Image (cartoon, rainbow, N blue to C red):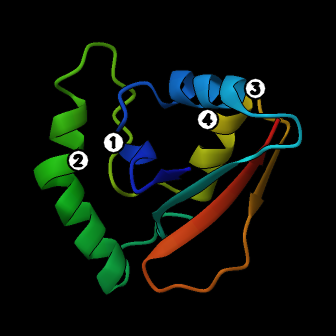
Amino acid sequence: MLFETLHDMANPVAVLRAAGAMLAPGGAVLIGDEKAAETFTAPGDELERFTYGFSALHCLPAALTEPASVATGTVIRPDTVRRFAQQGGFRAVTVLSIEHDFWRFYRLDP
């Protein structure tokens, strides 16, 4: 499980690849990360503006301290998670139907 961390990683694809390699047969990776809108729309709702602010002040600068960072930042959208998962070797990404104001949950299957 990766909780509130994928967006902070300089190389999330390598981490997902390693997580997939550690799975037992039939296992899956569970990700919980910020619930950003599906697409960018200005000015965004209050949560989106909050996450952009937090990203600019902490998550993005922290990730940029590492070489070759993909610099995702706090506002990680489902398409980004899907792309990282596919590049990390996962065949299926499911957005789980868990309702929460701040978090979105994903299941990644190898």
Residue 71 placement, left or right of 87: left
Residue position marked by numbered label 1 in the rendering: 8
* Callout 2 crowding tier (Cα within 10 Å): few <14, some 14–19, many ≥20: many
Q: Are marks 1 and 2 in contact (CB under 8 Å)?
A: yes
Mark nearer the N terminus (3 vs 4): 4
- Amino acid, disc 1: Asp
Residue 81 placement, left or right of 53: right
Q: Is residue 22 visible?
A: yes
CA–CA distance between discs 4 and 1? 13 Å
Q: Residue at x 66, y 59 (%)?
A: 106
Query: Residue 52: which disc?
Result: none
Residue position marked by numbered label 4 in the rendering: 84
Q: Is the residue 102 above or below the residue 77 in the image?
A: below
Name the image quarter holding residue 98.
bottom right
Mark nearer the N terminus (1 vs 2): 1
Mark nearer the N terminus (1 vs 3): 1
- Label 4 SS: helix
Mark nearer the N terminus (4 vs 1): 1
